Structures are given as C-alpha cells and as structure tokens.
Amino acid sequence: MTREMTVCERVRARAQDPATRQKTAVRYYDSLAGSATTLSYDELVRIAERVGRILRRSAARGGDTKTVSCCGIMLEDGADLFVCQLASMFAGLAVLPLSPRDPARRLVSIFEDAHVSVVIVRNVAGESLLREVGGDVKVWLADTLLAADTTTNDGSLVSPSAKDVSHVFFTSGSTGRPKGCVASHAALIAYCDSKNTAHEIDSESVVFCASSHMFDPHFTDFCSALVAGATLVSAAREITLAKLSGILRLSGATHCLTTPVLLASITDVESLRACPLRLVALGGETMSKSLAQSWLNVGIRVVNTYGVTECVAYQSFKEITDPVREDTRALGDPLPGNRFIFAAEPGDDPNIEAQPGRLAELWIGGKQVCDGYLNRPELTEASFRNGMYRTGDIVKMCEDGNHIVVGRRDDQVKVSGQRVELGEIEEAIRRTCGIFIDENKCVLNKYKQLVAYCIGDCPKGVDALISESCRFMVRKEVPQHMVPLAFVFVEAFPVTPTGKISRSTLIDRTVEYHGGDCAVGFGKFGVDVARIWSEELGVDVSFGDCHFIAMGGDSLAALRVVQRVKTLVIGRDGTTGGTFGEALGVFSPAELLQRPVLNDYARFIRVHTASWPKYDSDADEDKDGDEDEDEERRLSRGSDVGQRLLFSATAAGYENVVKALVAAGVSIDPKSGSTPLHLACSNARLGCIRALIECGASVNAFGTRRRTPLLAAVSTQACSAPIIDVLVEGGANVSAVDEDKQTALHIAARVGVSSSVIAALLDQESMSKTKASKPKPRLGINALDGWGRTALHWAAVNGHRNACKDLIDRGADIAIRDHNGETAREIAERRALCSAQERPKGGRPSTWGDIATLLGGSGATKHLKASFA
C-alpha cells in the first residue's frame, strides 16, 4: 500500500516541479494601493526550510520525546505568517496560533497544556506579553528570524509522518480553561484533498484567505491551496474587515471561505459580477436567504459548510441554488472521507441512529477526526470514541432527507463565528467579579447578544457603569469576543418545573440598556453620530455615555458605523489622502471599539479630522471644545480606562466594584491629580473610603489645590462624623492645609457641615493634646488661612449659624480680625445689610442678623442701619 504524502511533501513536490516552481504560491496585500508581496513555490519552500532549521535548533531540548512540541506563532497577518506556518511543519513542530490580544491568563493556561518550544512574535510588545506569561521558551522576532543565516547543518529538517501532529488550535473550555484540539498530518491532508475536491480548487485557482489566524480555516485554507498548486491570497486584517469587496476584486480571487457576517459587509455585490470570483463558502453561522440570493444574482456559487475544530476546519458541503425553497441551515453532505452519524436521543450511543422526523445528536467519523485534546485525557475520553467525535450539535432529521442543525446539547454557543463555552465565561466572571457577583449565568440571546445574568450586591437591571466595569475585568481573563455585552442583575434566575435554571427563558428576554444622564455632545454632529448608532444597533441611542459594545455592537457593526461616519464627515466621494491604510486610520472600526462611549468617539473624530463638517449648530457645541485634544490624549491611554471606571465606581458608591477593580490591578494612586480616595471623600462614600484605605490608598495624598482626602471630605455637607473617624484612624493629618492655607475646620465651617463633624474634628485636637508619647500636629480652632480668616469668619460669611455656635461653644475667638480688618460679627452685620445680589442665592438678611446677635452684635436690621449711619 502506497504511503499517503503529507502537506509538507506535497508542497515540496510543487517547489521541485518545473511546471509549478515559479508559480505564485502566496500573495499578500498590505494595502489596496501599491504592490503586493509575492512568493513563488520555490521561494516559499526555500525560505521556510531555512527558517525551519532555525526553529528546530531553537526547539531542541531534552525531555519526553512523546510530548507534542509546538511552535507558537503570534503573528496576525503578513506573508511571513505563512512562511512561519510552513517552517514549523518542516521543523517537525506543531503549529500553535497565539493572539497578542489575548489576556496573559489565557496564554498561561495554554502554555500549561502545550509544550511550547519556541514562539515567533511581531514586535517587542509580544515579547513583553510572553515575559508576563513566563516559562522557558525561545522567542524570535519575525523580522530577525527571517533574516537569520544558517551556515551549519545543525537543526536539520525532518519529514513528519502522517501520525505526527500538524497543528494544535485551542478552543473555549466549559471548565473555564481552553482546550487544545490536536490534529495529525493525516487529518490535515485529508481535509485539504476533500475541500479541494468539493470546492473545485485546482492549480488555476486563486484562494482568498479571509479568516483570522486564530481560526483553523486560516491555516487550512493556506495548506489546501498549496496542495492544489493554487495561489493563496491574503491581506492585512483591517483591509479584510473594512474593504473585503475591494480586495476580492484586486486579488482576482476565484474562491473565498468566510462567515456570513463578514460577507454581508459587502454592500456592492454587483461590482463583483465581472470578477473571477466563482464560489463563496459560508460557515460558522447561519446564512440568511437574502444574502445567498444576492450572490447568486451575480452568478457566484454559494455553499453552506459546517465544521468543528475537532475534525479539522469543515466537514460538510451544501450548495445553495434556490434560497427561497431551500433551508440555508441544511447540513448537506459530508466531505469525502468524512462520515456523519445521527445518534438517537439521548445521543450518547452512535450505534443507535435516529428516525426521520426526530432529533438526533451529530457524531463525525472518518479521516479528519483529530487525536483528542492536548493533555486532557478526561475530556478526550468524553468526546472521542472509536475514531468518532461527539459534536454536541442537535440535528433535526427532516422527512425530505435534509438534516438541519437546530442547537446545542451543552452550553456551547457560536459568537462571531467562534465556538464558545459559556462555562468558561462564567468562571472568568467568578474569578474577577466574585466580590459582588454571587452567581451568574451567561446566554446568547435571541438577538445574538452575549449577556450575563447575575445575582449579587448591585442595583437590579442593567447599570451602565457596573456593566462596563465587569467587561473591563473579564477582558483580562478571556478574549474580546467572549466578554458579555451586558451584565443584568436579577433577584433570582428563572427555573424549569424540575427546579433547574431555565436558560431558554433568559435567552428570550430583551435587555434594556440605558445610558446615564449625560447629554449627547458636539452639536448636530453628535446627534448625527447618535442617529447612526441607533440605526445600526437597532436601539435608541439618546445619551452621550451610551456604550457601543454594551448596546450590542461588534466589529462588523463598528465597520458599518465608521463607513457612515466617514460619509458624514467627508462625503461619499471624499478622501483623506494618502494610502488606503492612512485613510483607514481615523475611520478604522478599531478606533470605535477602543473608545465605545458615544461622546468619546465623537470627540475623537472631531479632533482627528481636518475637514470638520460645518454644521449650523456648531455654535451650540460644548464650551470645553478647546480641551478636546487634551481629553482625547487622556482617553487614548489604555490604563485610563480602568482609572476612569475606578473613579466612577467610587463616585457612585459601589464599594465592592471598587475592591474588584483594585484587585484587577487598577492603581489607587494616580501619578498626579486627585485620587479615588479624594473622590470617595468628596462624595461622602463611607464604604468606598473604607475599601480604598484597606487597599492601601494614601490618606494624606495631595489632590488638586493640595487638598488631602480629609479636606475633600469636609467640602460637602453630606460629610459625617464616621468619615472623619475612619480617615483619622487611617492616619490622616488633621492639621493639613490646602494651597489657601485652609484647614479642615475652615472648609467645614465654610460649607456648613453638621455639628457632629465639627465636633469630630475638634475632638481629634483634644485627643492630640492628651496623647502622652509623641504629640501630633494640632488643628487650631483659631488658625488663620490665606485671607487671615478663622473658621468662625467663614461660618459667618456663608450664613451657617449652627457652625458659628459650635465653634463659639468650643472656644473660638470672636475678636480676631481678617486681612480686611473685619471680625466675624462685623462680616455678619455687613451681610445682613447688603443687597440680595451680594448675598448667597436664597439667603435672607435675618440669617446674618441672627448670626450677628449670636456673636454679640445687634441682629435687628434697623439697629444695624442706625449704627452704621
């Protein structure tokens, strides 16, 4: 029996064949302008073999030779990405895609399962991320690796066998830990041949690779195109997302496999009628009938394909010819070499097949079935049996012979085309938000929004601030597509008659997201941006603090929004000049996703667009427009997101959210300006004050105008004696003064705090006198500020009679004169006689007359007038 060749051997054969060696193997576009990077089969193999020798030498180390040795590739795009994938296989290493956007904790989990010998990164940021992850691994910068010279035979290449591991792709795990699907070279070549046969890909084809490098279709599109002798075309990720139509035309692609959502971003389908594109295959999600029809109308074949990573990319093929009559969810036929088994309920025995009209669980057998999960024997045993894989997908056995995928048996869902275990998200929420969330259940609702329903110590419903804080913390644990769009707090979860939590009820619920009271800024432009958001998201966007992601926005919705905003700003036919990449900059979907609050995004566009639209209402825009640029710079710093959330949670009094944010690494002591503790004090949030002090916040830090937290605390009438006690117990300096030389007593008297607060401040003075050991600085009741005034002066100025009485009772000197030569009594008498415009709003003359009497003067207005006369 002839041994089946691997992808490596088939590609080498193409490079050695005179008929194909100079044929273009890979073509990569950095932009829609300028030339592409191209590699012939000969060039690709020569470079990959040279790099493969370096990788093999870098990965050489002792240990168990049975361990799968992986090459981590942390490159998101570029021609060198494909070189490194092929080089890894030439070196006998398993290709392991890694994302520089993944949180460090997820990478740590991957490294715990995978024996990663070497990692290739794009830049120093990737190196820094790997240092955070830790571990003994050789790291190569891609440019350095490709430029390295090999002059020895060290690290000679190998010819991987069919049984060797070709690649490992990690998917979401139900236990909160991702799991690695291990595929052999035999399974990989089986898929390549099956796909090429079904999709009719040959040496004349041009295959456009539209998937992210983190999806196995990216790797398998590359491999299958090379096996067929075709040309593989790819582009910078932002081009694929924002200009798919343009790159398909420019590249001359004949085949494209992508998701329905990405294909739907093409609004000018008619422009592709005369292009070479022959077939679009859609997987990952259900395609709409209208989408299929729009492509059929221009003469392009449409295919529905289904697949699981555990059986290498895709395993089915169903051509759609009449979307009106056909069910676009139909599974279709298995690709050659695959076998579908429809196990009767409960689906755990593939030997018992379901009858027509009934539900069944899909099992897959054949050449593409993977070897299992990397170093996870218990999971492998549960899902892989006798060369078959149990998918967990529920299929309806139709009477007409069609098979329709209708759902999942477990808690796995599809988000943005990626399989996600809800249990992994729930575990991440428990780890990061467990301080204030007792229980949580995640669902993908009927609007395809990922929502977390929670029970815990928070206001019921959707609170914009709490949701954003939760997303910020969970994002440190899982990739962006696994972060819930909203966190809904409920009294209790709905249950089924058997007492189990009813996810179906949660799925059917509508999430009502509300912004705060912040008005939409930037005049008519802000209103127009809000309208665009409303139309694209299908919800009312009427507040300036509405959050794009929380209201259901994703990368594709962002793409639609920025395209419309660009038209709004520069016109449909306008350009911003420069290359495509430069023009894309401000109007990139990433810019919206990085600043998802409406007013923040509107500010960003205004600051960075020279051709600012001249709306009639420009004069009515925010008065702080001159500060927009500084504000934008502040918002652009990633660390400020956590800081902003911490300040907001503190102001709102969400002490447990504050604790969780600090635990997530948000700094409690910014390098300049007021601290969260200042804000907690000025808002009289006792719980937050305690929490921040427990977390190590400085009680004597200087904020604006050199105010300490204690000075901030007494600046509001809501201040209470327990707040003073907590701060002093934490080490607050009671004698601290601000830049106006005002003590806490000055500020408290000026504001008119309660008698208990004044007593608490003065009691600290008494305590400092009685301490035997080291005397503390005293809070002088008659201390003078920058205007030469005492606390009593300020109480009199602002009409706070009770404060005046409290101070007099504690020994305040009523005879002290300020820099204007006035005593507190004389100030009160003057205020009693002045015009209404000179008194605080709503102040009555009798208020100061009473104070004058208290201070030993004549409170009657007529007597005062006579004395002054």
Image (cartoon, rainbow, N blue to C red):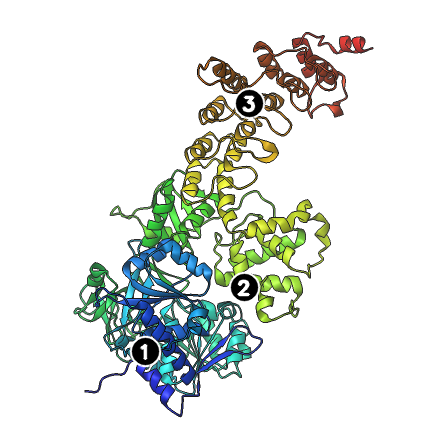
Q: Earlier in the sequence, mark 1 or mark 2?
A: 1
Marks 1 & 2, CB-CB < 8 Å contact: no
Residue 5, image x and y in percent?
27, 83
Q: Residue furthest bottom?
A: 18
Q: State the CA–CA distance, disc 1 to disc 2.
A: 53 Å
Classify residue 61 as left or right of residue 323: left
| CB atoms of marks 1 and 3 within 8 Å | no
Whether residue 122 sits left or right of residue 521 in the image: it is left
Placement of 29 over or under 408, stated as above or below: below
- The alpha-carbon separation of the residues under discs 3 and 2 comes to 58 Å
* Of labels 3 and 2, the one closer to you: 3
The outermost residue toward the front is 152
Residue 523: x, y in percent? 67, 51
Q: Relative to 725, does residue 115 appear above or below in the rendering?
A: below
Label 3 residue SS: loop
How many callouts does the rendering have? 3
Q: Please give the name of the residue rendered at 70% of the width and 19% of the height, measured from the top-left corner.
A: 844
Residue 459 visible in the shown view: no
Q: Which residue is mark 3?
A: 735
The mark closer to the camera, 1 or 2, is: 1
- Kindly state the secondary structure of the residue where label 2 is placed: helix
User: Which amino acid lies under the numbered mark 1 shown in the image of this protein?
Assistant: Asn
For marks 3 and 2 on the same chain, the one whose residue lies earlier in the sequence: 2
Left or right, 585 with respect to 63, comes to: right
Q: Quadrant of the N terminus?
A: bottom left
Question: How far, Cα to Cα, is label 1 from label 3?
Answer: 76 Å
Q: Residue under circle 1?
A: 153
Q: Dot 1: what SS?
A: loop
Residue shown at the point (32%, 78%) measured from the top left:
153
**Are the residues at dot 3 and dot 2 in contact (C-beta closer than 8 Å)?**
no
Hey, what amino acid is under mark 2? Arg
Residue position marked by numbered label 2 in the rendering: 560
